[in-house]
Amino acid sequence: MTLPESDARRAELARGYTAARERLDAAVAAAGRSPGDVQLLVVTKFFPAADVRHLIGLGVRTFGESREPEAGRKIAELRQADATDAAVAAAEFDMIGSVQSKKAKSVARWARTVHSVDRAKVVDALSSGVQEACDTGSRSADLGILLQVSLDGDPHRGGVTVEELPELAEHVRGAHGLTLQGLMVIAPVDGAAQRWMARAQEIHAAFVSDHPDARELSAGMSGDLEEAVAHGSTCVRVGTAIMGPRPLVSQ
Ligand SMILES: *Cc1c(COP(=O)(O)O)cnc(C)c1O
């Protein structure tokens, strides 16, 4: 089975991707940081495998997905359609959405890193999912783990409090098949991005002093990537600015 091709969509994605890259490069330069310090994760949730294929053609290799089973199906479809393509094989997918324990097993089969870990129960489920995926040959490397920290305590957006963070970090360190890599935040959309990202930077600095080998900070989306990069983000997760508006489907 091949994926549908559309020159118009490819051109639209090329424009969106180029514009986002330019924004990111400008933000990195403005912050006095080095090019390559900040990874661009293109968020393809709700969009089809054909879009991911177009983006791979544009040179994108790192993607963010937030919903299972949508993500697992899309990645399988992509790989089936281009089974011999080295660029498709090299593409990596991160889970950026909240993980339910019962879906952890399938996420462990395809994810490079999970950005949104905020419960010990999910840590345990991912750890046993990784073990099973390794046993059955669907993965060979550890799963990267970022702990999602809540900046404002809103349960809807998820994340642990700063107080809960040390215990959860120790829990990840004690789990087989998982590598603690850092933190992730989602800033509230209230016009105060500078303040939220400054807070994230503070939390991150304290975390890194306890965990010097877990230095990632996944922060910044279409609306606040400049503020995130100014405050130490190592990975921005950009959807809308590249893909266009998502179809309106309730999450
Ligand atoms: C959807 C999503 C994004 C991308 O958001 P945009 O505003 O479309 O760039 C980033 N992070 C998470 C966790 C998401 O769920």
Image (cartoon, rainbow, N blue to C red):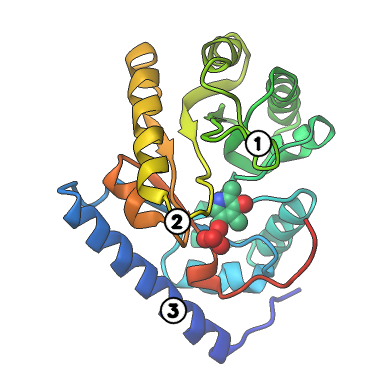
Q: Amino acid at mark 2?
A: Gly
Query: Which quarter of the rendering shows the C terminus?
Result: bottom right
Instruction: Answer with mark 2 or mark 3, whichever residue precedes in sequence.
Output: 3
Q: Residues within 10 Å of mark 3 (few under 14, many from 20)?
A: some
Q: Answer with mark 3 or mark 1, whichever residue precedes in sequence.
A: 3
Q: Is the residue under label 2 in contact with that under label 1 (CB below 8 Å)?
A: no
Q: Which label number is shown at residue 181?
A: none
Q: Nearer the viewer, mark 1 or mark 2?
A: 2
Task: Quickly name the residue at label 3.
Answer: 14
* Mark sitting on residue 158: 1
85 and 25: which is toward the camera: 25
Q: Are marks 2 and 3 in contact (CB under 8 Å)?
A: no
Q: Position of residue 157 (x, y in %)?
A: 65, 42
Element marked by disc 3: helix
Q: Amino acid at mark 3?
A: Ala
From the viewer's perspective, tell me whether residue 56 is left or right of residue 250: left
Q: Quadrant of residue 78?
A: bottom right
What residue did someone put label 2 on? 191
Dot 2 lies on which element? loop
Q: Quadrant of ligand 1?
A: bottom right
Give the spatial CA distance, label 2 vs label 3: 29 Å
